[in-house]
Image: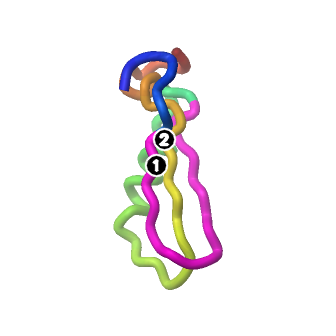
Amino acid sequence: MKGKNSQPIKSHRGNSNPLVVIVACTHGDELIGERVIEALKPVPLRQGSLLFIIANPAARAQNKRYI
């Protein structure tokens, strides 16, 4: 996960609508979004889908605002 061209990391749960997308770590030194994703992963869905995106994994891995 190093380098400027690192792709976002995506994780998806569910298979129906509505689709809710949560984007975290646009800036690698902002950690709360990643914590929210980890807290939501085990929560059962009554309906809909969740898409979790770690937007800047290279910056997150280095704990830097951006790379």
Which amino acid is tagged 1?
A: Lys
| For residue 2, above or below residue 14 | above
Decide whether the magenta segment is chiefly helix, strand or loop: strand
For the residue pair 7 and 24, the one nearer the viewer reads as 7
Comparing 51 with 7, the one in front is 7
Q: Position of residue 44 (x, y in %)?
A: 40, 77
Residue drawn at point x = 53 percent, y = 37 percent: 55
> Whole-percent x and y of residue 22?
57, 53
Q: Read off the magenta span.
A: 9-26
User: Does the segment drawn in magenta span residue 18?
Assistant: yes
* Vertical order, 40 against 10 (above or below): below
Residue at numbered disc 2: 54
Q: Decide whether residue 45 is among the magenta residues.
A: no
The amino acid marked with disc number 2 is Ile
Task: Indicate how the structure is coloured in the image.
Answer: rainbow
Q: CA separation, marks 2 and 1?
A: 7 Å
Residue nearest the viewer, comparing 6 with 29 = 6
Which part of the image, by quadrant, shows the N terminus? top left
**Residue at 60% in and 57% down:** 21
Judging from the image, what secondary structure is the residue with disc 1 in?
strand
- Residue under the point 50% across and 22% down: 5
Kindly give the residue lying farthest to the right in the view shown: 18
Q: Is residue 53 left or right of residue 19?
A: left
Mark 2–mark 1 CB contact (< 8 Å) = yes
Up-down relation of residue 54 to residue 52 (above or below):
above
Disc on the earlier residue, 2 or 1: 1
Mark number, residue 10:
1
Q: Nearer the viewer, mark 2 or mark 1?
A: 1
Image-quadrant location for residue 57: top left
